[in-house]
Image (cartoon, grey):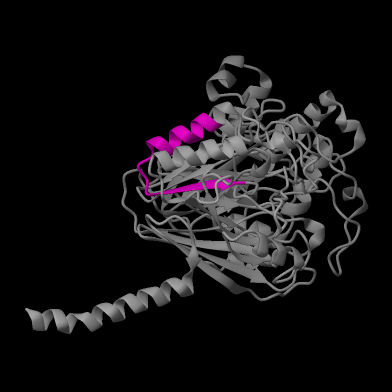
Amino acid sequence: MPLSRRRLLQTGSAGAVAVLAGAGLVSSSPFRAPRALGDPFTLGVASGDPLPDGVVLWTRLAPAPFAPDGLGGTGRAPVTVDYEVAEDEQFRRIAARGSAVATRELAHSVHPEVRGLAPDRWYFYRFRAGSAISPVGRTRTAPAPEARIDRLRFAFVSCQHWSSGYYTAYRHLCDEDIELVVHLGDYIYEMEWARGRVGTAIPETLRAEATDLTGYRLRYAQYKAEPELRAAHALFPWVCTFDDHEIDNNWAGFQPGAGIDIHLLPALFRRRRAAAFRAMYEHLPLRIEQLPAGPYTRMHRRYTFGTLADLTMLDTRQYRSPLVCGDGANLVVDCPDRFAADRTILGAEQREWLVDGLTRSSARWQILGNQVAMAQSDYDPGTPVAVGTDAWDGYVADRDAVLAAAAANGRTDLVVLTGDRHENYVVDIRGDYRDPDAPVVATEFTGTSITTGRDGADLTPRGRTLLAANPDMKFFNGQRGYVRVEVDHELWRSDFRVVPYVRERGAPVTTRGSFVVEHGVPGARSASDAARAQESAEVDTAGRAPVVGAGG
């Protein structure tokens, strides 16, 4: 299991000290930066996991990010990295400052955890290593737990395969008036193609499948070198989790997916999983609680935004039971094993933690940051139900348990955010798919990919099939982009922002569809229908008013 801060302190090892120094949690003597360091901030800056009194900051010193050894060209020596957090972009009003130590053990990344900030406020931050100063980043703290905030605005994203296209969606996301970005997984892909983007060839050294720590470090460097991704990290705090491609396609627990044959051996896959988790921690704004311990990392966690919303990030990969009825890549019609009571996608501990959180929370909206589709996805418009088993359809008992707990506790404002599918969906979730009359208990918004699947299309053949086979599906779109969300105490609104192409630069962005969920009414409807209904209600009220007055 992941190392706690206390356990790290108790070990007293050089590696533990390096981790604590990288998080800025212990003091140390300053280590000078090499004179020939060059620009160490090629991979940018980032912040994440906002709390009411602070955030975690991130950068990695990598003057040569594609150095074949994966160490970024920094050398072996530790380097002290100073940071400042200010209330203004000119850094005249300093709110916090400190230092962290970048060491070889963590590829010269640092994750200082800044506390003592004011809640619900924008801040600016920067790093310094030697004479080099980083780009300025912007971040925001969460509201106080009991604060009644008027609204929350954020975007959620997933699936950003480098070879599939350019990160134009992130350029448009940078223009949005939001406070947070939620990343639902497939931040990297273990495999790349030799061709994909127009005018950009992948370097030979990056074409191999990532299977070890060096390979995963190089893959993250490849992705974070993209200016649009760096810009989005610098402008907003992020909350991240992982899906499968951070390690291996369709992996499940300690069952490998479709990667290199040698990693089908359990011991070698455990080593691969440990390397992938380590590289992920080194390249994302994660707290020390997410530091992996070998092949384990705790990524399920919860964030509170006043009395308005709780955001609960799930991990549907690490603790799940092995796939059944195939490898999850093909549809199944007859698969009784997927209903087995002992099959789990969350693991018993995480499931109990999730249910307990849904029970205890006093926030109005419960938001689940989830990797794979929770609602049933039938791919056959006829009588047999044809589903994939890599999603919650392969783990029915866990789905039933979570939804039953939410319903039993009166959680009518449950919204599930999902990635993975490379398509935009809006689906009402029913409590029991074996009962056609089961009530709707939640709403699922599935966001498309940033690039994966190349340009895509508005309505694909698969989309037509899904709409025909799933009456609870309200919307389908197969283009690329992200989902922008605005939620207040009475209404949730999701805007599906899409670009028409990604294989070339310069695509515009439009809103393809907008859907709302009303407080106390599970299920979604189009924003236009909701607006018309509101107008009709207002007209009806206005029409009755004179009659009531005359009768008085």
**Horizontal side of residue 195 vs 231, given as left or right:** right
Which residue is rendered at x = 50% and y = 35% of the image?
Answer: 354
Q: Can the viewer see residue 10?
A: yes
Q: Position of residue 382 (x, y in %)?
A: 71, 58
Q: Is residue 17 magenta?
A: no
Quadrant where the C terminus lies?
Answer: bottom left
Instruction: Answer whether residue 354 is magenta in the image.
Output: yes
Count the marks: 0
Residue 386 at what x, y percent from top left? 73, 50
The answer to whether residue 177 is visible is no
- Where is residue 356, by image quadrant? top left
The residue sitting at 78% across, 52% down in the picture is 222
Q: Is residue 198 above or below residue 440?
A: below
Observer-nearest of 216 and 83 = 216
| Observer-nearest of 484 and 386 | 386
- Whether 399 is drawn above or below 192: the answer is above
Along the horizontal axis of the image, is 160 left or right of 81? right
Q: Nearer the viewer, residue 265 or 425?
A: 425
Report the quarter where the N terminus lies.
top right
Where is residue 119? Give x, y as percent.
Answer: 38, 48
Depth check, front residue: 125 or 383: 383
Q: Quadrant of residue 550?
A: bottom left
Q: Position of residue 383 (x, y in %)?
A: 70, 54
Q: Which portion, as a residue range, is magenta? A: 351-370
